[in-house]
Amino acid sequence: MTEGLAGALWGWPPPVLDPAGPYADSVTVLAWALFAMGVVVTGIVVAALWVALRGPERWRRVLGGEKAVWIGGVAFPGVVLTVLLIWGLTLTASLTKPITGDEMRIRVTGEMWWFRVEYLDAAGNVVMRDANEVRIPVGVPVVFELRSADVLHSFWIPHLSGKLDMVPGRTNLLRAEATRTGQFGGVCAEYCGGPHALMGFVAIAKEPEEWQRWFDARVAADSVQPLAAVSTTNPQLAQGRELFMENGCAACHRVAGTQANGLAGPDLTFMGDRATVGAGILPNHRGTLTGWIGDSQGIKPGNRMPSYDRLSAQQLDAIAAWLGQLK
Amino acid sequence: MGVLTACKPPAQTRQHDDAAAQKRGLKLMETKGCGACHEIPGLNWPRGQLGPSLMRFNDTGLIAGYLPNTPVNLAAFIRNAPATKPGSTMPAMPVTVSEAVDMAAYLQGGGRD
């Protein structure tokens, strides 16, 4: 098992045509069917071209006749395209079938240039916040409620579903389901300015029991105060927390249980539990976290977090140490 | 210069000819995110500026200005810098011994400039 980003994201950029769920399945089948049709039609056209240029006189006369035009130009494409359209719409009908209300709900908001994640209960209340990562139970249908806070983004987990735009002022619903456990890479699939190419996330599918345990613990920690965030006897962690509060990090980031309550940037309550740093672009460990805090503009030019290059390496390390143990 | 050459072991003891190890090393440097802080030969992104550039590391006499640039020292430093050089601000990395050896092989093999 490889670690790091490639391992975490199972290929980057995430490979298409490698479905891990029913919705991605139908998209993949349709893609291959269209490709096969394209090959057949191209073959027929090339063969006809050869007959027209080099073929025997008798064949050329047939090809040039009115009958050939009616069959090859009207009947064949008419029948094939109609069948293909009906089949394609039937195949992908599941992608747009109405929401029953029994699905798990996760609201994902596209921001320049990261993903805000909110887990909703059946009534639509936010019960847990995260960023740049969604965790879902295997075999459970999920509806992603997609929004945008600024410009057009697009939400795409190639392994799990089709892609759907995130449109300002609208909520678009995308169905997804995983049939096997794993970590699947996701990307923003609509150019959204500046570091669009570095706007990613991870979808993690776990066994339902495991997922439930994780989710319950998260919900409890998000509403109560995580002890690790509040009190610590480790001097480095205490220093890291103090630096985080003093240097304005709290103006944009929230850490539940502390006075850090900023909403402009990703929620960091569970930063240490996240697979990636910088919105799906670097594996999450002490080193990358330090690098990101100190030089986020070098890593992801134009993103909205300033590089904290005025802090010393020792100070950056302390902040990274504190954030890394928030789980 | 005299000091540097004195500290730098003879080339033949540092050279790794294992191309496979070097290839693995580069891949590891990419997947572990070393580029978040370092400029690394053969890696287009990211090219972090927070830590020292690792370009032409083969010509570097001392690791972090402290340890002779030998494969063993470098692998140990990559794995756990603070334990190897007290006070180092490079944190310990989530890599195994063999992974650190491959990364050291890549850096000391001259890399792809």
Image: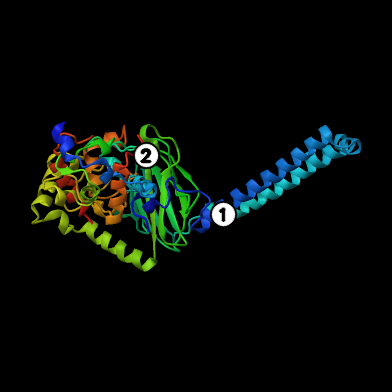
The label shown at residue A26 is 1
* C-alpha distance separating marks 2 and 1: 28 Å
Tell me whether marks 2 and 1 sit on the same chain: yes
Crowding at dot 1, Cα within 10 Å, few <14 / some 14-19 / many 20+, comes out as many
Residue that appears at 48% across and 57% down: A20
The image shows residue B49 at horizontal and vertical percentages of 24, 34
When asked about the image quadrant of residue A124, the answer is bottom left
The image shows residue A106 at horizontal and vertical percentages of 38, 53
Under circle 2, the secondary element is: helix
Q: B79 or A171: which is nearer to us?
A: B79
Residue that appears at 46% across and 55% down: A176
Q: Which residue is mark 2?
A: A198
Q: Using the image, name the chain to which the residue with label 1 belongs.
A: A
Residue that appears at 32% across and 42% down: B109
Label 1 amino acid?
Ser
Residue that appears at 34% across and 39% down: B111
**Left or right side of A18 for B19:** left
In the rendered image, the quadrant that contains the C terminus of chain B is top left
Label 2 amino acid?
Leu
